Image: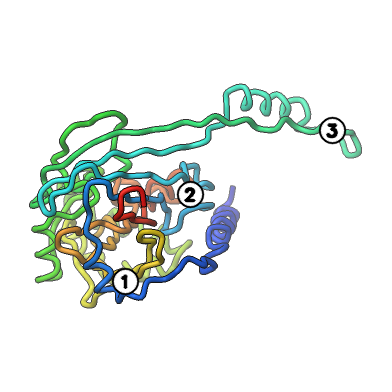
Amino acid sequence: MTLSLRHTSIIGALSLALLGVGCSSTVASSLTPEEASASLTLTAGSEIVLRPTVLGLGGALVGFLGAQTQDRQISVTEWIPGSSVGLAWSITTQTETAASVAARAAYEAEYGQTAIGEEIPKGPEPAYEVTVQSGTLRSDALADATTLGLPETWAEGDTGVSKTSLIWISRAAYDELVNTRSTHFSLGLFDESLMQVGEATGKLTSYLEKIKSLWSDEASSSDASVQEQAGDLLTVEADADWGATTLLVDGVRTRVRTIEARNAFGSFTILAHPDNPLLLELRLTPLSQGNLEVLSPSGFLAGFGGYEVSQINKKTGG
């Protein structure tokens, strides 16, 4: 497939992913973003819903690139602000059965190539089975952890205590980011600290050259800062002003105050709450997994993946 055809396919998926945006009739909160953020305290029983994204978009685009599009349901089982958290999570998916896959393959083998005018029987309807993945984990490192534990690394079953801060930045990192607009933390996807400055500069330059042909805005926004990013890869820099994003809180469309930050490995939208600095949105760059093969669906998935928090229920069962 040529680059132009790939580009066309991806743009088509982007268009599908955008359908329906802005059409929600959900009641909107009357709180200011600052008030809404301050109100987002968690307790045991609170629920968080995560949605996988690529290039900041979910739905059709994620499915097009071969990933599961189902939400990850997270229940908070323990919550001590700035100290520890316990989580139980699950993902429910519908997977096509082996028999259904085989039936479709047999149909395609028999009728995939037929002459014009030849009658073709209707193909078999796909059959699905429900698959549930689930697990539990906890962290006692919310105070000062320097590594996140992103959902894609969570294993099924009880995985015990993590040394990471999971999907929160640590309280120490939050305070430093607010007061100095700069901090350090690792995504934990690979050991970013081992990447040498020279290698990183070369990889970033290569990445920019490749991506320019697809998304010029992405390239131009990063181009000016390549040298600075390569100089200290783990440094996370925050915007000068507060940001804002919208999510459902107890079923109400709520705009919350955020910190918008980034480094060479990703862009981060962090809830502006010192006791609950939840990473509301993560948008990865290819460098985050040492993956610069961006000109293929699998490359886009690994190189530009991430997630967003679409919903928080503060009330048990809300």
161 or 249: nearer the viewer: 249
Q: Residue at x 30, y 46 (%)?
A: 289
Disc 1 to disc 2: CB gap under 8 Å: no
| Residue 228 % position (x, y) | 19, 66
Placement of 197 over or under 252, stated as above or below: above
| Residue 74 % position (x, y) | 32, 44
Q: Residue at x 38, y 63 (%)?
A: 247
Mark 3 residue crowding within 10 angstroms, few (<14) / some (14–19) / many (20+): few
Separation of marks 1 and 3 at Cα, in angstroms: 54 Å
Disc 3 designates what residue?
120
Separation of marks 3 and 2 at Cα, in angstroms: 32 Å
Instruction: Identify the mark nearer the N-term, 1 or 3.
Output: 3
- Which amino acid is tagged 2? Val
Asked if residue 160 lies left or right of residue 313, the reply is left
In the image as oriented, which residue stretches furthest toward the right?
117
Q: Nearer the viewer, mark 1 or mark 3?
A: 1
> Where residue 62 is drawn, which disc sits there?
2
Q: Secondary structure at mark 2?
A: helix
Q: Nearer the viewer, mark 1 or mark 2?
A: 1
Disc 1 designates what residue?
244
Asked if residue 154 lies left or right of residue 109, the reply is left
- Which amino acid is tagged 1? Ala
Placement of 275 over or under 127, stated as above or below: below
